[in-house]
Amino acid sequence: MPEPLEYFVPFQFLMRAPVPQSAGSVTEDYIARDVYDLMAEEDNGIREALHRYVFIHADEQRVEKILNSEWNRAGRLHLFQHRDSEGVPLRVPDDEMRPFIDTLRNRQLRYYVGQPIDSIEVGDTVILRLSPWEGHKAIITRVEVRGGKTRLTVTLDVLGNLTRVTFPDVHEGDVIFDDETIARLINGNLLHNFEQEVLSALARRFGRKPSEDDRRKATSHLARLYGYNGVVIDDIDQQRRFMALMLICASLIGEKEGKKRYVSQFQEWLGDRKEPVNDTEAYLMLSLFVALRDPALRDAVKAYKNTHPDCPDIIRQMFSKVKRLRCR
């Protein structure tokens, strides 16, 4: 299996991080509100310049293979190699790419993947990104898959009247969860928010005598969270912990390819180590236990949390929920 592709999407949804204020003043760690709002106007220019760009870190042969792949040619949206006026492919040196990413981060710009269609359920409230209803809020009333295409029926308010509209072929990013749901997940401390969401789903899935409805709702919750597996976090430790959460989601919803990819990556990072040496490694081993059901991994995490008084509470809490998983 080829190595996971390394890529960078500047942003699909541009969101400005909130500016904390108290007693009408702003601390020195943050930009004043009027300057911040002025930056927003510049951000529109950045968004326009980089709209629909994807930066891929790979050699020429692999890029060519991606461009000529069946999935790229068959999709409604295609990847094309950007070329200059003389037809030469655009290349960005590695030593220039990192400052570029840092610049976006320092300006508090964020980038996310579109909401996957397979995480949308009947009854969800979403924002449409389909013409001519772009920006309208709607409620999903029917989801059908026919011939590999997703057919979506929604109910929305048109001039005070509830109207049912059907879209015969929708794709990732055509609909997104309503603003409140998005804000709750990806605004502020993203890793903490996802930790709490995963913990909530684990509590439902592995609580005392969970019903079939509990299991179904927990699986749906985890699938929705897994839909954000393409989110990138700059801090390496936080990114690895976020990936560990995605492995837990993938394992419990039966996403085999994602599970296989994360397991391979984590095992490469951990090497031959049998015991975690820091919080992040304990995090990875906990998620590997959920994926592989290896009792040695469970015991290693248990020993770490019992011998490290400063072990993060989230590891203790998640461990308490999954420790009774039947081992293979």
Image (cartoon, rainbow, N blue to C red):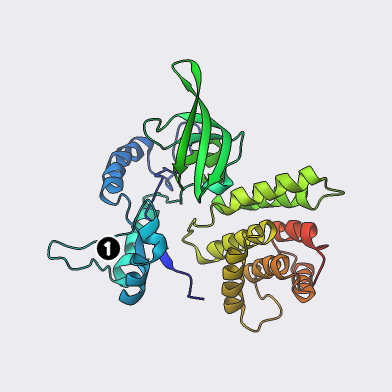
Nearer the observer, 66 or 276: 66
**Given the current orientation, which residue lies at the most extreme bottom position?**
272
Quarter of the figure with the C terminus: bottom right
Q: How many marks?
A: 1
Quadrant in the picture for residue 69? bottom left
**Given the current orientation, which residue lies at the most extreme front position?**
147
Quadrant in the picture for residue 269? bottom right
Could you tell me residue 80's position as x and y percent?
29, 60
Q: Is residue 194 left or right of residue 307?
A: left
What residue is rendered at 67% in x and 56% in y? 253
Q: Secondary structure at mark 1?
A: loop
Could you tell me residue 320's position as x and y percent?
79, 58
What residue is rendered at 31% in x and 44% in y? 43
Q: Relative to 273, is 51 above or below?
A: above
Is residue 182 among what the camera can see?
Answer: yes
Q: Relative to 143, is 94 above or below?
A: below
Q: Amino acid at mark 1?
A: Gln
**Label 1 Cα crowd, 10 Å radius (few <14 / some 14-19 / many 20+):** some
Residue on which the image places disc 1: 81
